Amino acid sequence: MDTFRKTLAAGLAGMLLLALAACAPEIGSEKWCADLKAKPKGDWSTNEAVDYAKHCILK
């Protein structure tokens, strides 16, 4: 029974993670560009900075 609970908990956690990831705006969309522009530049990852330049500045 303990193994069943662990498996069920892991499955539910995975489903929650997928649901939350699906809510993020698509990279390069107007919403994504606006959200990133509002975020402090010091909090951007390298990938975010490259994607922002490619999709929001150099369109």
Image (cartoon, rainbow, N blue to C red):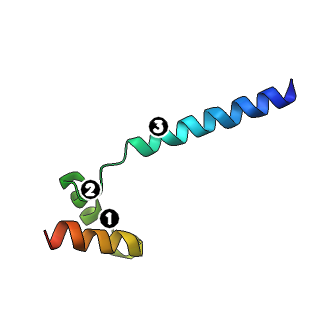
Q: Quadrant of residue 32?
A: bottom left
* Label 1 to label 3: alpha-carbon separation: 23 Å
Q: Quadrant of residue 48?
A: bottom left
Outermost residue on the left side: it is 59
Q: Is residue 20 visible?
A: yes
Q: Work out whether mark 2 precedes mark 3 in sequence or the reverse, and give the earlier one.
A: 3
53 shown above or below 36 = below
Which numbered tag is attached to residue 32?
2
Amino acid under disc 2? Trp
State the residue at coordinates (23%, 74%).
Answer: 53
- Tell me residue 8's x, y (percent): 71, 29
Using a 10 Å C-alpha cutoff, classify the residue at mark 2 as few (fewer than 14 neighbours), some (14 to 19) or many (20 or more): some
Q: From the viewer's perspective, tell me whether residue 17 is left or right of residue 30.
A: right
- For the N terminus, the quadrant is top right
Q: Work out whether mark 1 precedes mark 3 in sequence or the reverse, and give the earlier one.
A: 3
Residue pointed to by mark 3: 19
* Label 2 to label 3: alpha-carbon separation: 18 Å
- Tell me residue 43's x, y (percent): 41, 71
Residue pointed to by mark 1: 39
State the residue at coordinates (23%, 71%).
Answer: 54
Q: Are marks 2 and 3 in contact (CB under 8 Å)?
A: no
Amino acid under disc 3? Ala
Q: From the viewer's perspective, tell me whether residue 27 is left or right of residue 42.
A: left
